[in-house]
Image (cartoon, helix red, strand yellow):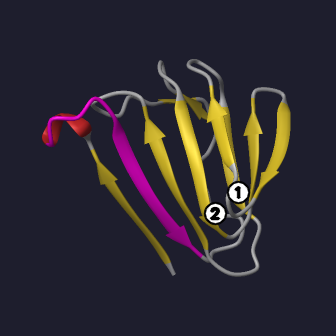
């Protein structure tokens, strides 16, 4: 099961955009990319391994990870169970540069 919803702030009068992510597919996640703004991940349940710049960090329920503007990043769901998180983009629309 994999489900995500995207909301661009400009469509609702907000300065932030949001992705609601929910998946139980181990290994799934976006490939390496970056944004010209900060992205904040709020993990509700499950676990994922984040690569932020040259560092790796495992995140789990209750963790908040902040990726500074311009920093290459990606994550992969670790399992078991469902990874559910809210990804907050500090922009009224999504701007993504794919690096791989």
Q: Is residue 60 magenta?
A: no
Q: Residue 70, image x and y in percent?
A: 58, 18
Q: Residue 81, image x and y in percent?
A: 69, 81
Q: Which comes sooner in the sequence, label 1 or label 2?
A: 2
Q: Is residue 74 above or below residue 46?
A: above
Quadrant in the rendering for residue 78? bottom right
Q: Is residue 3 above or below residue 69?
A: below
What SS does tag 1 mark? strand
Question: Where does the C terminus fall, quadrant-wise?
Answer: top right
Quadrant in the rendering for residue 90? top left
Q: Tell me the tag on residue 76.
A: 1
Contact between labelled residues 2 and 1, with CB atoms less than 8 Å apart: yes
User: Which residue is drawn at the image coordinates 75% and 74% (left, top)?
Assistant: 79
What SS does tag 2 mark? loop
For this rendering, which residue is in front, 100 or 6? 6
Q: Which residue is mark 2?
A: 28
Q: Label 1: how many residues lie within 10 Å, few (<14), some (14-19) or many (20+)?
A: some
Quadrant in the rendering for residue 15? top left
User: Which residue is drawn at the image coordinates 54% and 59% (left, top)?
Assistant: 85
Left or right? Give the position of 18 relative to 36: left
Left or right? Give the position of 19 relative to 39: left
User: Which residue is drawn at the image coordinates 70% and 52% (left, top)?
Assistant: 63
For the magenta stretch, what is the residue range? 12-23
For this rendering, which residue is in front, 58 or 97? 58
Q: Is residue 81 above or below residue 39?
A: below
Q: Residue 68, image x and y in percent?
A: 61, 23
């Amino acid at each position: 099961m994999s489900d995500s919803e995207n909301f661009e702030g400009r469509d609702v009068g907000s300065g932030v955009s949001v992705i609601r992510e929910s998946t139980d597919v181990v290994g799934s996640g976006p490939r390496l990319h970056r944004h010209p703004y900060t992205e904040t991940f709020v993990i509700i349940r499950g676990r994922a391994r984040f690569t932020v710049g040259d560092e790796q960090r495992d995140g789990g329920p209750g963790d908040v990870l902040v990726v500074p503007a311009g920093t290459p990043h990606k994550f992969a769901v670790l399992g078991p169970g469902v990874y559910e998180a809210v990804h907050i983009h500090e922009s009224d629309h999504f701007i993504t540069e794919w690096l791989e």
